Image: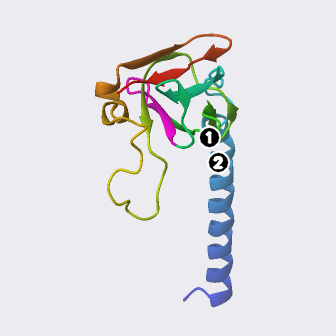
Amino acid sequence: MKPSRLAAGAAGAALAAKSRLLIACAATAMAPLLWGCGPAEEPRYEVHGTVRFQGQPIREGRIALSNAARGVHLNANVNPDGTYEVKTYRGKGIPAGDYVVSILPPVLYAPPVGDPWPFIPVKYRDPATSGLKLTVTEGDNPFDVDMKR
């Protein structure tokens, strides 16, 4: 005798309910592994300063800080008075460590004609040639840059 459609439907519904319950239990058991039980957020320390070219504050640009070993790469915009403050989506500051630094032109949405930023010498645009290094330590970390030709 063949099972009725009603019996087959009831068996399928019971299997689906068990599957949902199993998935819910597994998700509940895995939740602590996904959030809350990992390492605490790393402390961040403030970095700020002024970027100058031959003693005069630059009016636009970016300062880039990079720690390749830790995978930390950040840019901060330079304000019209030459000052900057490093921030992340979590707020002010960056993790402690050694950073190489470069000074970059502002982000453009169209290619410039020539070099409209002679106040940012080419050597400072590359962390390998800028010669700028910063060690971020606990507390406040002022870092001023005065670029020379």
Residue 136 picture quarter: top right
Which stretch did the figure color magenta?
A: 61-73
Residue drawn at x 54%, y 29% as measured from the top left: 56
Q: Is residue 65 left or right of residue 69?
A: right
Towards the viewer: 28 or 22: 28
Judged from this view, the residue extending furthest toward the top is 138
Q: Find disc 2 in the rendering and name its residue.
A: 27
User: In the rendered image, which quarter contains the N terminus?
Assistant: bottom right
Q: Is residue 96 left or right of residue 115?
A: right
Q: Find disc 1 in the rendering and name its residue.
A: 30
Amino acid at the residue labelled 2: Ala
User: In the rendered image, which quarter contains the C terminus?
Assistant: top left
Residue drawn at x 55%, y 89% as measured from the top left: 2
Amino acid at the residue labelled 1: Met
Q: Is residue 74 left or right of residue 26?
A: left
Give the secondary structure at mark 1.
Answer: helix
Q: Position of residue 23 (x, y in %)?
A: 63, 54
